[in-house]
Amino acid sequence: MSENVKKILEKVEELKKRKETIKLGGGPERIAKQHAEGRLTARERLDAFFDPGTFVEIDAFGRTIGRELGMDKVNLPGDGVIIGYGLVDGRPVAAMAQDYTCLAGTMGEMHGRKIVKITKLAAEWNIPIVGFNESAGARLQEFLEVSRTYGEWFYYTSIYSGVIPQIAVMMGVVAGGQSYQPGLSDFIFMTKNSAAFIAGPPLVEAVTGEKVSVEDLGGAQMHASVSGVCHVLAEDEIDCINKVRELLSYLPSNNRQKPPWVPTGDDPNRTCEALYEIVPANPKIPYDMHNVIYEIVDNGRFFEIHRDYAKSMIVGFARFNGYSVGIVANNPLYLAGGIDVWAAEKAARFIRFCDAFNIPLVYLVSTPAYIVGSVQERLGMIYRGATLLHATSEATVPKITVIIGWAYAGAYIAMGSKYLAADLVYAWPTAEIGLVAAEGVVNVVYRKEIAAAPNPEEERKKREEEFRETFMKIYYPASYQHVDDVIDPKDTRIIIIKSLEALKYKRQKLPWKKHNNMPL
């Protein structure tokens, strides 16, 4: 062996030792503690997320820059964050993972620089980025420079919104300014034992006097069902990672691509006779729209977003004949399918994501109205309800609508109506379309006749039924081109697939603008 080779091998051995030290993060004791609390380490999360052997780390040797307030005596391998890229189902994805074993995953200057770097690289490479977040927040010993890196992270997350998919995963606690960046992302995943908040219970009590538990303040279940911060709730970390991988399978890598086609083996000519049993002939009888979705999509596979939040609206991803779509559906099981401010915003946000990433939209409609009353008005229904109108109007992807039951008033207009430029609108024979419910019309238009009748209540019911049969049953609206066709429910899947094929090459341009002014 030559002297030169010996020297090279010595250097290679030193490299291996340095990398092994870096891979230990905060050390064996802290890794053991992480495991004892039921959580994986940052590296274990990345190993589980990426296809085996494909992850490539960059900036492993990034070191802590702070030297004040004792930081010169602290050893933080990689400054507590791992960044890199790899393959997920054979497609490139960038990622970062905060290492809680290194000073609780706190954000220092180099920590932030690395995250900003991988965010910018992901955008330059036109690939999605996934962030595995677990952090106690800002590293106060480096307080001023942390503000800079936080700001840059927020900035690049914002300007790359709608350019590449950005997914945030919360495992453990995510606190302080750290929690804002996930809020800027497209989707937030949380494990059931995770939590996120701007300020933890001790600070909340010190500032406001309020005593609150971690779970009530920012627990995953609260965020999934009350605040709406959590889009997908997972049982544990492996379940969460698998769910993120599944979501990515529905998405393109960037806004210039279409979603990948995936063979599913489900017959595109399959009819759905089970729908006859699932949906009641009388729209006043509640039913679960999930069962309609499971019946018509490929293999009954539906990836739901915000499952436990604003339950009168259902949104999520599915496939028809292998093509990815976004589904927006009313759920008559809750509020009779009515749309409150939370349901409107939930749907609007989802629609805008699908439109940004070229994912066709399928609307399934059964809604009596936007929810009225003082509570909703005080919550800002006029502008928050309008978000759904705005999102549907500006979406230029293929928009296909199937009206199943009620389709009344502004809710009908917002849910993919012809008036908001839906491409194809179909209806079942059970559908009803109206400006308001028949009861509302009759009480105004025929109030004198009803009052003069020997039995006003009987006269009211008679008038209501006559009006509904004459003007609201689907054949009257269909005669005025409010829908493109009335279809047999069992053919719903076939019709949607044929519509998607017809709209495959759709191109629509909106008036030039810097950006819109969506009601927020």
Image: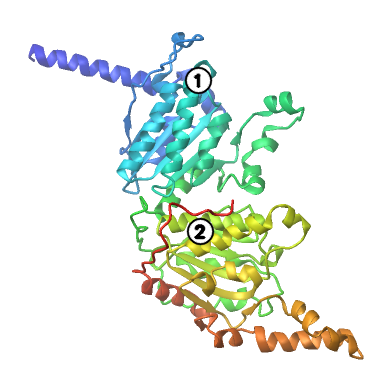
Disc number at residue 399? none
Assign the N terminus to one quadrant of the image.
Answer: top left
Query: Which corner quadrant of the image does residue 320 belong to?
Result: bottom left
Q: Left or right: 20 with respect to 515?
A: left
Which residue is drawn at the image coordinates 43% and 52% (left, top)?
514
Q: Position of residue 191 (x, y in %)?
A: 56, 40
What residue type is disc 1 on?
Answer: Leu
Residue 237 visible? The answer is: no
Q: Left or right: 197 with respect to 114?
A: right
Residue 448 visible? The answer is: yes
319, 206: nearer the viewer? 206
Which residue is drawn at the image coordinates 53% and 24% (left, top)?
138
Residue found at the far bottom of this picture: 454
Helix, strand or loop at label 1? It is helix
What residue type is disc 2 on?
Answer: Ile
Q: Left or right: 504 with respect to 7?
A: right
372, 193: nearer the viewer? 372
Helix, strand or loop at label 2? It is helix
Disc number at residue 144? 1
Which residue, given by chain and number where applicable, does mark 2 sit on?
351
Query: Which corner quadrant of the image does residue 404 belong to?
Result: bottom right
Rendered position, 77 above or below 376: above
Alpha carbons under labels 1 and 2: distance apart: 38 Å
Disc 1 or 2, which lies upstream in sequence?
1
Crowd tier of the residue under label 2, counting other residues whose Cα lies within 10 Å: few below 14, some 14–19, many 20 or above? many
Which residue is drawn at the image coordinates 49% and 79% (left, top)?
491
Which residue is drawn at the image coordinates 70% and 75% (left, top)?
436
458, 170: nearer the viewer? 458
Q: Position of residue 98 (x, y in %)?
A: 46, 29
